[in-house]
Amino acid sequence: MLRMAQATIGNSEFDRDTALTRRAVDGDRHGVHDVHLSAGWVIGRAVNGGYLLAVLGRALRADLPHADPFTITAHYLSASRPGPAVVRTERIRAGRGLSTGQATLLQRGADGTEVERIRVLATYGDLDRLTDDVRTTAEPPHLPPYESCPGSADAPGPVPPIAARLDLRLDPATAGWAVGAPSGRGEMRAWFGLADGRPADPLSLLLAVDALPPTAFELGLAGWVPTVELTAHIRHRPAPGPLRVSLTTRNLAGGFLEEDAEVWDSEDRLVAQSRQLAVAPLLGG
Amino acid sequence: MLRMAQATIGNSEFDRDTALTRRAVDGDRHGVHDVHLSAGWVIGRAVNGGYLLAVLGRALRADLPHADPFTITAHYLSASRPGPAVVRTERIRAGRGLSTGQATLLQRGADGTEVERIRVLATYGDLDRLTDDVRTTAEPPHLPPYESCPGSADAPGPVPPIAARLDLRLDPATAGWAVGAPSGRGEMRAWFGLADGRPADPLSLLLAVDALPPTAFELGLAGWVPTVELTAHIRHRPAPGPLRVSLTTRNLAGGFLEEDAEVWDSEDRLVAQSRQLAVAPLLGG
């Protein structure tokens, strides 16, 4: 992919497209922000859920005394559309090391009434204040080198707008769905970066956990896989360099499936874990 | 353990201790319930988080048009105490197949002001309306027979009040911590039931996911492991018979750890999955 001038944290497509304008409000317990949801993050019928989570995460960062989403849960209520939206936040508790807040994303429906799109509950802290101790049995996913993994330019068909924003390189072992030969395993792996070269930070990790094609594709299920709920834990500030993301689905039952994401940085740190509950496409014939 | 007359769903210690009294309120968007948190579910310094989640889950069940918590997230803000508490609910969205609500548990502090203990966000549905399809690669935990696993009567020291409410039988392979010989692995496994024989249902699964000793004990870390956030997915209505619960911690880093629970029923169904983010006890010497 031909890259533009290297973007930075604070000066990138991702930062511009998640920018909020704070309205004046009384007190510090509630916040109101205006945002324009960019059409650049559309995939399928809706705006990407990870991008929306990053918008809400940024609003909470602005309104809580701590900077980093240690744990953030989003319930997706209705499909967001590109265009204007409002984020309302509530500071629930502000502690010394952790603070908890809530946020909601609203848009005007066709009849002009406000429709709630997403409700979020999160606890924030400061990653930079954590100790460096690590005791882990988790292992980074095995991925072929970045150069050996196909990107959106290699896709056989048209790609959604979000593909131009991301530098996503799929593990060929989990890319069979794209050529009609899904593996049958609930796994998806990829190298992840932003197309303009913006380095990763805790906010972009909220995008990374929901940016890969759904595992359902590799299970041979085609169609929309709407997220009911997604919870992400940001465990460490990511080091510079591309991220590796793995998705795993172990249990598809009753029309629902869980999708677990892990994000690893270039120093082999597990920087984010997430799980979402999603609606499975109808089982194929 | 000598059992009392077999309890039933609706007539058991667990049901009496999660009973709510609804206050009259205007409209159906908000609910207010009084509850008495029982001292029978105390462990360490606080009331058990799974019991509290069940109380909140029951309030949402009363106030939402669907019965079962498909996904429920709790942020634990301050330690609950036995005694009176109030649960306030908000119906966020009521859809055909799913509905989303929020709940908060409040208690009076020493100075009489209301203190928020827990904030919950959840999406409910009807488990009985799901299809029976299952495609899973998840496998139930390997546990020795119930009769071979030690219960609280076998514990070397005093046990907390909650031990009398539960019929918890630890896998000897993960019980080393109780005799000063932790395995060093972040695993905990047990048979789980209620002491009075009440069968499991989706509400008691909310208890089951947070009822075992913390994995930190088997990692050789002693002390309090406060939950920051816990998310549980209830995937299937549990069949009669004892449950098997496994806890796994893969990544302890920066003073925090995740604890993943799986609950399996007697028909080898994965009935619940959960993950919590908790504060690790200080690393031992």
Image: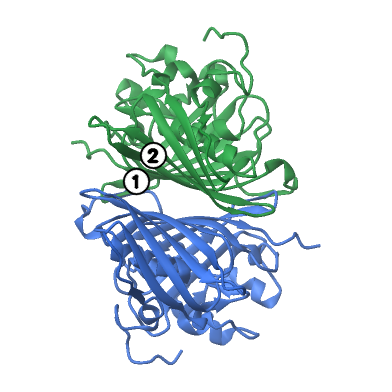
Chain colours: A blue, B green
Image disc number at residue B84: none
**How far from the left and from the top, in percent, is residue A97?**
22, 50
User: In this figure, which residue is indicated by the disc labeled 2?
Assistant: B186
Q: Is residue B223 left or right of residue A43?
A: left
Q: Where in the figure is residue B245, as x and y percent of width and height?
A: 52, 33
Q: Is residue A285 left or right of residue A126?
A: right
Q: Chain of mark 1?
A: B
At mark 1, the secondary structure is strand
Residue at the spot 61% in from the left edge and 28% down from the top edge: B200
At which x and y percent is residue B11? 61, 18
Is A285 displayed left or right of A233 in the figure?
right
For badge 2, the amino acid type reads: Gly
Label 1, on which residue? B257
- Residue B241's spot in the image, x, y percent? 64, 24
Q: Residues within 10 Å of mark 2 (few under 14, many from 20)?
A: many
Secondary structure at badge 2 equals loop
Residue at 50 percent across and 83 percent down: it is A40
Asked if labels 2 and 1 touch by Cβ distance under 8 angstroms, the answer is: yes
Residue placed most toward the observer, A182 or A152: A152
The amino acid marked with disc number 1 is Leu
